[in-house]
Amino acid sequence: MEIGKMMNEKRILVAVDESEESMHALSWCLTNLFPQNNKTILFLLYVKPPPPVYSSIDAAGFFFSGDVVEALEKYGKDLATSVMRRAETVCNNFNSNIKVEKKVGSGDAKEVICAAVKKLQVDMLVIGSHDYGFLKRTLLGSVSDYCSKNVKCPTVVVKQPKNEKNLDHQS
């Protein structure tokens, strides 16, 4: 038995962010991977962008206010809180008996997710896909592609059906 894991306990990590795709992946996970009477821990992981490095003088030679730095840090914390509340609401709509642990990381999303998978000893990673085209994926990179190639557990990449995407953008 591995350290920190109970017998028959499954550990699933779902990466969440402010996108509809990540909430769809969470809903899919809850619908398809949580049979009744199963001991499962669901980890919700939100990754904040790394804090920018600020200089006291900006490019134009003006001093950079500490208030701006504080405002950006507050925005990051507020966004993390908002995403986690939304994810909790999704979980509560499915099954209130699921053990949920919330984690917030900071840094490059793909690296933080892979490190969390290893540290939390999860049995499966569930991640949403923005379903970018070739050019956008080439320029931006794909977090789901990177994670699926670099974690040591099964990875489920959940794509939101195109008809649901169109409905979300029309609202």
Image (cartoon, rainbow, N blue to C red):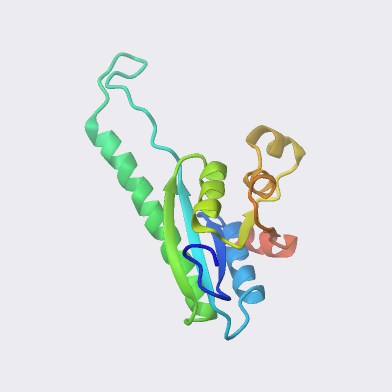
Q: Is residue 26 left or right of residue 70?
A: right
- Most extreme residue toward the right is 134
* Position of the C terminus by quadrant: bottom right
**Where is residue 8 shown, x and y percent of the image?**
58, 76
Q: Please name the residue shown 32% across and 42% down the image.
A: 73
Q: Please name the residue shown 69% across and 61% down the image.
A: 160
Decide: is 101 above or below 15: below
Query: In front here: 78 or 42?
Result: 42
Query: In front here: 82 or 94?
Result: 94
Query: In front here: 25 or 145?
Result: 145
Q: Please name the residue shown 46% across and 74% down the image.
A: 99
Decide: is 113 above or below 30: above
- Most extreme residue toward the top is 61
Decide: is 74 above or below 169: above
**Where is residue 170 shown, x and y percent of the image?**
63, 60
Query: In front here: 134 or 29?
Result: 29
**Where is residue 79 shown, x and y percent of the image?**
40, 52
* Position of the N terminus by quadrant: bottom right
- Quarter of the view holding residue 127: bottom right
- Most extreme residue toward the front is 1
Q: How many marks?
A: 0
Q: Please name the residue shown 28% across and 34% down the image.
A: 68
- Most extreme residue toward the bottom is 37
**Where is residue 23 shown, x and y percent of the image?**
56, 63
